[in-house]
Image (cartoon, coloured by chain):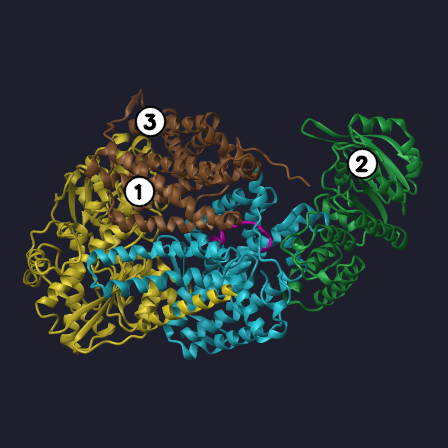
Chain colours: A brown, B yellow, C green, D cyan
Amino acid sequence: MGELMFGIELLITGMLIGLMYSMVALGFVLIYKASSVFNFAQGAMTLFAALTVVGLIPHVGFAWSLLITAVVMCVVAVGAERIVFRPLMGSTQLTIFMGTVGFASILEGAAQMIWGTRPHGLKLGIPHEPLMLGEVYVSKPDLISAAIAGLLVIAIVLFFKRTKIGLGLRAIADDPAAAQVVGIPLHRVWAVAWALAGMVAIASGVLWGSRIGVHFAMSLIALKALPVLIIGGIDSVAGVIVAGLIVGAAEALGEGYIGTHIGGGVQDVMAYVVALLFLMFKPSGLFGQATIQRL
Amino acid sequence: MNHARQCWKWAVAAGIAITTVAPIASAQTYKGEIIHPMMVTRTGPFATASTGVIAGQQDYITLVNMQGGVEGYKITWEECEFEYKVPRALECYDRFKGKWLMVYPNSTPAIFALQERVTKDEVLAINLAGGRSDSTDGETFPYLAPVVANFWAQATSTIKYIAQLEGGESKLKGKKIAYIHLDNDYGRQPFPMFDDLAKAHGFEWKSWALSWPALEQSAAWVDIARRYKADYVIGWLYGQSCAVPYTEIAKVGYPMKKYIGSLWCGTEDDVGPAGTLANGTVTANYHAAGKNFPVLKEIEDKVYKAGKGTTDPARIGTVAYNRGVITGMVIVEAMRNGIKAHGAPLDGKKVRDGYRMIKLDDARLAQLGAKGLVPPLVFSEKNHGGMDAQVFQSWDGKTWKTISGWIPPNEPMVRAKVEASAKAYRDQVKSGAPAK
Amino acid sequence: MAAVLAQHALLEARNVHRSFGGVVALAGVDLAVNPGEIYSIIGPNGAGKTTMLNAISGVFRPTQGSIHFNGRDCTRLRTHQIAALGIARTFQNLALFRGMSVEENVLVGRHALMRAGVFECGIHFGRARGEEKRHRASVAAILEFLGLGHAAREPADKLPYGLQKRVDLGRALAVDPRLLLLDEPMAGMNHGEKAALMALVTELNRGRGITVILIEHDMGVVMNLSHRVAVLDHGVKIAEGTPAQVSADERVIRAYLGSEEEVH
Amino acid sequence: MANEIADSTPVVAARRAPHYPGTRVVAFVLLAAFAVVAPFVLTEYWIKAIAIPTIIFGLSAFGLNLVTGYAGLISMGQAAFMALGAFTAVIAYGRFGLPLPLAIMLSGAVAALVGVIVGTPSLRIKGLYLMVATLASQFIIIWALQRVPWTGSGSFATLNAPPVRIAGWDVSTPTDKYFLVLAVVALMTFFGYNLVRSRVGRAWMALREHDVAASVMGVSMLQYKLMAFLVSSFYAGVAGALVVFGHTGAASVQEYELDVSIKILGMIIVGGLGSVLGSYLGAAFIMLLPILLAILMQKAAAAIGGTPAAVDTLANAEHVVFGALVLYFLIKEPKGLAELWHRLAAWVDSKVYSFNGAQTGGKK
C-alpha cells in the first residue's frame, strides 16, 4: 500500500481509538464539572463495572447483566458520594483527590475479592474482519465503539443543556455556594454526577473490554484520558471529543512515523507531549474557560 | 480532649499491630520440618498467572508431604504477598531472611533487585525461563538460575521454529521478522540474540517497543502488517498485553499462525479473553500442557480427594499450574539432594548445592511421573540451566495443542552470549563499574 | 501642567490606558502625586479606581501610556520590582496570607529588604541569622504601632475583620514604602475604627513622610484627609484639585448623581 | 475552573499559639536518641526493610511538601525525580567513580535541574492542570531514562551499583547503610526545616496563599516558584541516590512509576501539607500500613485454616482496608497526622503545665 494510504489508515485507526479515550475522559469531566474534583477512581470504576458485567453474563445474559450492573454502579456512586465527598466537603482539592485514590484502592480490592483475579473475554459479536475502503482497512468494532462513544458524549451534552439536574450541575460548577443558596440540592446532584460517571464507566468498560479483554490492568486505561482532559479542557464536555481525536491521531502518527525509526514505544509518551504543548500555549485547553483572578 | 484520647487509641492500636508483626521478623527453623517461604502475587495485574503457579507448587509439595515428605521431612510453606512490586519483594525477602531455602518470585525485575541480597546470604534465586539470561553461568552467578530455557535460548529456538516452517534455516535469508515487545528487562533481553541470529541467517528484524501496560497496540500493528509487511511477528508480551494483539491482527488481516508469542504469553488466561479471535495463534512453551501426566493425576486423586488442594481443580493441567508443579519438583529435588549430601537442617547453601546436583533425566522424571512434561533438566556448578528446548503450541479456542517437537536452542550461540555477558559482568564488578 | 509637575512629582502617570477584553477600564488618565501629600482618587463604582492602583503597583501593565516613580519609568517593571522601589499597597479584599501568622504576614512585606539566599537560609547562619533577627524586631515595632502586638502569633485569618485590615496595612508598611496605596481602607468599619485609622494615616503621612494615594467611598474621610483629590468616571479623570474645589465641581456631582450614589 | 483556581491551593495547618516546648522537646530528644540506638536494639529486618526505606521516602515526601505543601504547587513527578537521582547516582559513582558524597550531590543537582524545567508550566497554570503537567513529565522522564541508551538501561533495564565505600568506610552492613541514610536525611531535614522558617519559606507560603499579593509585597513569582521545584526535586534526587546506596543497591525504572508518585503525594496529604513532621509521619503511614495489613491478612488466613479462597480474598482485602483507612484519616484528620500529634502534644502540655492549661490546651 502507498505511504499516503498507510498514513490515512494510521490516522483513522488512531482517531477511532481516540474517541474511546474521550469516552473514558468523559467520566472525569462529569465529576469534575459537578465538584471540581479530579476523580482518580474513574479507572477503578471502569474495571469494577466491566468485571461485574462479565461476571453476571453467564448467569443472567448480556442485557440483564448490563441492567444489574447499572444498578450496582448507582449504588457505588451514591456510596462514593457518601463516603468520599460528604465527609470531605470543604477540604482542599488535594485532600479530596487523595480520597478518590483511597476509594480506588477499595474498589480494586473489592473487584478482585468478588470476581477473582483471572481475566475474562467480552465479545459483542461484532465481526472483526476489517472494512475495506479501497486500500485502507478500518476496524468495524472500533467504528461501532467510536460511534457509541460519540453518541454518549452528545447525550451527556444534551443532559447538561436540557435537564434540570444537568443545569444544576453547571450552576454548581460555576459557583457551589450560590447554587446552594438558590436551593439546588448539592448532594443529590453530586450523587447523580457520580452515577452518570458510573454509567460511563460501564460503557467504557464494556467497549474497552471487548477490545482488550476484561482484566485488572484495565483500570490503567484511565491514565490515557488525562492528556485528553488537558487538551479538551477539564470542564468541557464537547472538548473531550475533539481532544480524543487529537490524542488518538498524535499517538498513531507518532508511533507510525517517529516510533518506527527509534524502535517504537513513543505512543504513550506522544499523548503527554501533546498535552504539555497545549499546557504551554493554551493552558485552559481547547474549550475550557480561561479564568481571571480578581483582586 | 477526646481528640487526644483518640490519639492514644490509635497509638495503642498501632502498638498492638506492630507487636503482632514483630515475631515474623525473627527467623528460626523447627526440627523435623522444612520451612519454605514463598513470594506470591495474589493481587494486582499479575495475580492471574501467579495464582496458578503458586497453586501448582503448593499442591505438589502437599503431594510430596503425603508421600512421606523429603527424606522424611515435611515441608511447610509461608506466603509473602509482594504484588509483583520490587520494593515489596525486597521487604518480603528481608522479612523471612534466614528462612529462605530457595527464592522464586516469578518476576524478572524482582530477581534483578534481589541479586545482591541472595548472593550475600547464599540463597539460590530461581526464575524459570526468566531472570538473567547470563545466570546460566553458575560460576559467575552462584546464586541465580534460569532453570529452563533462558531468554536467549528462547529467542534462538523460536527462530529455529520459524526456520522449520520455512523449510530450513537457509530459507530465512531475506525474511522480515517483526519483534513486538514490552519495553523492560524482559522484552529487551533478546535484542543482542536477534542481532546475532539475523547476521547468521541473513534475515532482517525490527523492534516495536510497547510501554507497560501496552493495552493499546493498534498503531504498531498497522505499521508491522501494512507497511513493514513482516513475514513473521514474534511477540514478547506479558499479562493482559498478551490478549491485546488478536483484535489488531484480525483488523489488519495478518495470518494468525505467523504471530508467535513468547512462552510468557503461553497460558490459557493469556489468550482466553480474545475468544475465538485467538484461534490458531502460536506460542512457545518450555513444558507440555494438559494433565495426562501421572504426577498430575496423583495430585488430583490424592491431594484434591483429601480436600487439601489449593485451587479450583479445573486449573490442574493448565499451563500456569503445570509450571507451578515443575517449579515444585525442582525445589523439592534440590532440597532432597541437599539433605542427602549435607544432611538436615537445610540452609540456602545446602539447597543451592542440591540444585547443582539435580539430574532430572527421563528416568528420574518417569519416577516422578512427569516424563515428557519437561525436557530433562541436568544442572551442575557450571550450568544452572537455561539451555533447554522449547515446544510450540497452537490455541484451538479451548486448549493448547502441541504442534512441534522439542526444538532445542542454538546452543553454541547462546553459550557464546552467556559467556561474553558473564565475563563483562565479572569485569565490571572487578572495576567497580555499575553492573548491568 | 503635568509636564511642569514632572520635575518634583513622586509618582506620575501619563495617559494610562487599560482595557480587559473589550471593556475599557482606563482611557488615558494623567496623575501627578507630589511627595508627602495624601492624594485621593474617588469616583463611582467601575470608574477604574482600583484598576489605577493595579496599574501603579504593577499588577496589570497599562495597555498604553507610562508610569513614572521618582522620575524613573517603571511601566515595564515586574510587580515585585515595583515593590522594591518602595511602592506598597493594601487590598480591597485584604488578600491576607491565610495559612500564616500575623507576624509572618508582615514579615513577607520585608521580603525585598532581606538578602539571604536559599543556602544561607537553609543553614541559618551568618547573614541569614542576623537579618532575620533585625527584621523580626522591626516587624514587632510595626505590630506595636498598629496595636497588633498581642496578636503577633495568631493565625491572620482568625482575627476580627478590623484587625485583619490592620494586618494588611502592616504588611504594606513593612515594605518601608515611600508611596502607600490604600484601596478602600475604611470599608466595613464603624466610626470609631475609621477615626482611629484616619489618625493612623495622618501619622504615617506627617510623622513618617509617607506619600499616600487613597481610594475611599466615605467622602467625609476623603475630604478630611486629602490634600488633593482626583475624580475618575468611566476611566477618565473628570476633575482634580483640593477637596473644596472638587466637591464644588458640578461635573463631579453629575457623575455621582448619574450613578445614583450620593455624596455627603 | 473558577472555583478550581480558588481551591487549588492547599489550606494548611495555621501556626498555633506557642506551647511550652515541653512535650515536643522531650519527644524530639527521645526520637533522636532512638534513631541512634535503633540498629542495636532492632532486628535487621526492622532496619533494612522498615526504617531505611521509610526515612528515604520520608525525605522525598518532605521534598514534595516543599513544593506542594509550602509553595502550593501540586507536583506528581516526584518518583521520576527520584529515578533521575537513582540513575545519576549509579552512573556517577559506578561508571565515573565519583566519591560518594559528590555522587549524591550530583544526583540531587541533576534532578533539580530537570525539576526547574518541569516546573516552568507552574508559572502559568495551577491546580489540576499543573497536576497533569507534572504527571506528563513523570511519564516522559521515565520513558527517557529507559530509551536513552547512554543511561545503560539497555537490554538489562536494571543498573546495579558497586559496593558502597566512603572515605575508607565500607558501607556494607544494614547498620552502616542505616547510618549513611540517617546522616543525609537528618542533614537535609535540618536544612529544609530552617528553610521553611526563613524568608524563602515565607515567600513560598505567601505565593501559595495569594500569589498576586505576594508579588506586590516584593516576592518574585518566577524566581520562587521555580526555586520551589528546584529544591523539591533536589530532595527527590538525593532520596533516589539513597535508595541506590542505602536500600536496593540498584537503579531500575520499575521502582519509580506513577503509582510511587501518587504514594508520595499521599504521604504528604495524609501526613500534613506544609508540615516537616507530617512528611515523615505520612511516609511511615503509606509505606508501613500495607506491609502491616499484608502480614495481618496472612496471619488471619492461617488462623482460619488457609483455605485457598480465604487466602486470595484476604490478600485482596488488604487493598480494601488500606483504602478505607486512608479515607478514615483524611476525614478525621483533614490537616494530616501532624495535626494529630500537635493536638496530642498540646494535650500533654496542658496536663503537665496544668496551671496554664487554659492557653495550651490545644487550639480548637
Q: Position of residue A142 (x, y in %)?
A: 32, 29
Q: Amino acid at mark 1?
A: Ile
Q: Chain of mark 2?
A: C
- Is residue A137 visible in this depiction of the protein? yes
Q: Is residue D26 magenta?
A: no
Q: Position of residue D126 (x, y in %)?
A: 57, 44
Q: Which residue is mark 3?
A: A143
The residue shown at (34%, 69%) is: B94
Look at the numbered disc 3 and give the secondary structure of its residue.
helix
The residue shown at (20%, 47%) is: B267
Q: Which residue is mark 1?
A: B180
Look at the numbered disc 1 and give the secondary structure of its residue.
strand
Query: Neighbour class for label 3 at 10 Å: few (<14), some, many (≥20)?
Result: some
Label 1–label 3 contact, CB within 8 A? no
Q: Chain of mark 1?
A: B
Q: Position of residue C175 (x, y in %)?
A: 77, 53
**Which span is picked out in magenta?**
D70-80
Q: Is residue C221 left or right of residue A188?
A: right
Q: Main secondary structure of the magenta part?
A: loop
Q: Which residue is mark 2?
A: C66
